[in-house]
Image (cartoon, helix red, strand yellow):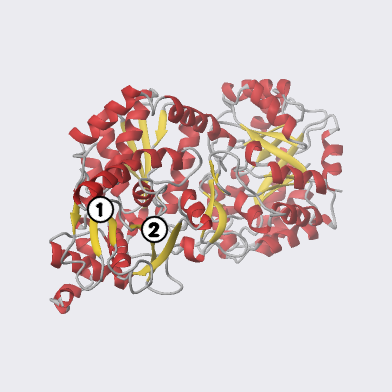
Amino acid sequence: MSLASLQARLAQPDPSFSPFFVLGDPDPDTSLAIAQAAIRGGADMLEFGLPFSDPCADGPSVQTACSRALRAGMTVDQAFEIMRTLRSASDVPFNLLVYANLVHRRGPASFVADAVAAGASSLLVPDVPPEEGTELGAACHHAGLGLVHLAGPRTTTDRITALGDAATAFLYLAGRQGITGASEAVPDETLHAIRTAAAASTVPVCVGFGLKTRRHLADVFRAGARIAIVGSALVDVLASCLDDAGSPRDVTALTDRIEQEVADRSRWSGTQGV
Amino acid sequence: MTDGMTPTLGAFGDFGGRYTSELLLPALDELAQALEDIVPSKSFQETFARELADWAGRPTPITSLGRFAEGTGIEIWAKREDLLHGGAHKTNNVVGQGLLAARLGKTRLIAETGAGQHGLATASVGARHGMETVIYMGAVDIARQQPNVKAMELMGATVIPVTGGAATLKEAINEALREWTASVGRTHYLLGTVCGPDPFPRLVRTFQSVIGTEARHQFAANAGGIPDACFACVGGGSNAIGLFSGFLNDDGVALFGAEPAGESSTRHGLTLSRGDPGLLHGARTYVLQDGDGQILEAHSLAAGLDYPGVGPEHAHLKESGRARYLGVTDEEALDAFERLSRTEGIVPAFESAHALALARRAVADGLVAAGSRVLVNLSGRGQKDLDTYFALGRDSESTGRASS
C-alpha cells in the first residue's frame, strides 16, 4: 500500500482533492467517524495532522483543533490506531502532517515504521527542512514512505527544484506566505507561484494553506496543482457542530455535514472548469 | 545514536539547528549572513559600543557582596546588569538586534515577551529607531503584568494578546513565529534569548557576551585574577551565556547555572536537570515533554525562568560537562531576594535571586571549595517583582530573618 496508492492516484488525469483533519478532534471516536465520512464524500486523499501542543505552522482553527484532541486524551498510538481502522476498509492515500518533536521523540526510523504500519502513504514534517532532514529522509526511503517538502510563494525556482528533488511524494506549496486559515480569493502571487513550482518541480505540486471554496480549487488546479488541500475551512465546519464544551451536539449530523462538504469539493473528473 | 535526529546548521554539538518551516529559511539565511558580514564590521561594532555606553549606560560595575556572603565561606562578587537601562541584561540584545534590523532595512520589529521585560526592552529600542513595534504576550501574562503592558504602549508599541494553550511565554513565541512567517521581508523578529532556530542562539550570544568580556576585565582589576566559579540563572539562558562566554576557555573557572525548581517536584522549570533532548521553537535542545513529545508547561515564581526549553548551547555545555545546572526552589530564591535587599541594599529580580541562592549554598553543595572567589550575574533588578513579593505576605512575618 503506502506510497504506491498515492502514486497511482496521482497518475490519473484528474487532480486530487484532499480534506485535512486533526486526528482525535474533537475526540478519537468522532474523529474516526469524520474521516470515514470524508472517504464516503469522495476524498481522493486524506491529510491527517497529529495533534501537537505547539503547532507553530498552523492558524487558529487548527491550533484549537489540536487543543481539543489533546484535551480528549489523544495519543500518537491512538492516532495510528484510527489510521489502521480506516486503512482496513479503504485504499485512499493518507498524508501525515506531524511536527518534528513527535518524530524526534520516537526516533525517525521507529516513527516512520509505525506510520507505514498504520497505512500512511506520505509524511510532511513542516519544521524539518531538507538540510536538517537527513535521518528522516533515510528512514522514509528505507520504509517506502513518501516524503513531502514544504515551499512558499517566495521560494526561489532553484530552491523549488531542490525541494522537489528531495521530496519523493509531492511538493507542498503553501497557498500564501504565512499560516493556514485565510479565506480571500487565491492571490495572483499564489497562482504565479503554482505555475512556477509546477514547471520547476520534479514531483507533483500540492497546494494547501488558505484554500476554502470549490472556486479556489478550480483556480489552483488550472494553475497546475495536482493536489489541493482544504484544512481550516473544514475544521471550522467541524467546530461549528460542537457545543461549548467541545463535544459534538449530534455526531450523525456532524458526519453528514462533513460528507456533504467534502462531496461539494470532490468529483473533478472531466469537469475541472467549474 | 542509531535512531536519532541531529542538527546540521549552527550546531552546538548535537544541539541547535534550524528546525523551522521552509518559509522562514530565507529570513534565517539573511540573518546568518548578517551575523557573518555586518556584526563583526568595525562600523557596526563602533555604533553598538557607543549605543551601549551612551543610551544603555554600559559598562555596568561589579560589586563585592561582603555582607551577603557572610557565613558562606566564599567571596561573592556580582555583575550588575540590574543597573543597565531597562533594568536587566535584556537591553544588550535589543540594542544589537535593533541596530542590525536597521542595517538590514527592516522597518518593523516583532517580539515575544513573558512577564514583559523583553517586551519593554524591544519597545524601547523600537522607539529609539522609530520602528513600528508589535509585542506578542500571553493573555494570562497581560492580565498579571498591566504596568509593563502600559509602559510598552507608552513607548509606542502595540501589545497583541495571545490566547492559545496556557497563554504565557511559550505561546507568545509560537505566535511571533507565525507572524514572522506571514510578514517576513520588512519585519525583524527580535527574539529575546539564546533559544530558537539558528542563527538566534549565536546572534544573541554575540550581543550578550559584553557581560562576560566586561566582567573578566573588572574582576582582574578589582579582585585580581579570574574567579573560581561563575553563577547565573537559566531560563532561556541568555544572561548565563553572556557571563559564561567570558570564561569558557578558562578551565579553572567552574560554571554553574541555576534552574527554577519551583514549588514542588511536579511544578518546576528544570529543563536541563529533568528534561530530555527534543525539538522546540526551531532548535534541538533539552525540553520538558511527555512520552509522545508533547511540550509540558514550566512553573517558576520568576516569570523569566518559566520556559520548558533552554538555549541549545546550554544543552551542549551540560552534555560536555563544561557547565553544571542545579535546581533552586522558589523558597530559596525568595530567601536570597530578601537577604540581598537587607544586607547590600540591592533588590534583585526573582530570576537573579536563583543564581544568588545557588552561590550561597555552593560550599555546602560541594560545588566550590571554601575560600573561593565567585562571580554571580545579577541579571536584573527586582522592582518588577515587588507586587508579587508583597502579595506573599512574607514582609510582615519575616522581618529580620535574613540578618541573622
- Mark 2 and mark 1 lie on one chain; the one further toward the N terminus is 2
Q: Nearer the viewer, residue B71 or A244?
A: B71
Relative to A13, is B235 on the left or the right?
A: left
Q: Work out whether residue B61 can be spotted.
A: yes
The answer for which chain carries disc 2 is B
Q: Position of residue B304 (x, y in %)?
A: 34, 56
Q: Nearer the viewer, residue A30 or B6?
A: B6
Q: Quadrant of residue A5?
A: top right
Q: Work out whether residue B130 can be spotted.
A: no
Q: Quadrant of residue B360?
A: bottom left
Residue lying at the far front in this picture: please name it: B225
What label does residue B254 carry, if any? 2
Vertical position of residue A184 compared to residue B171: above or below:
above
The answer for which chain carries disc 1 is B
Q: Nearer the viewer, residue B19 or B138?
A: B19
What label does residue B351 carry, if any? none
Q: Position of residue A129 (x, y in %)?
A: 63, 38
- Please name which of the two marks, 2 or 1, marks the residue nearer to the observer: 2
| Other-residue count near label 2 (Cα within 10 Å), few / some / many at <14 / 14–19 / ≥20 | many
Vertical position of residue B331 compared to residue B207: above or below:
below
- Name the residue tied to disc 1: B380
What quarter of the picture does the N terminus of chain B occupy? bottom right
Vertical position of residue B316 compared to residue A247: above or below:
above
Circle 1: residue type? Gly
- Dots 2 and 1 on the same chain: yes
Q: How many marks?
A: 2
Element under disc 1: loop
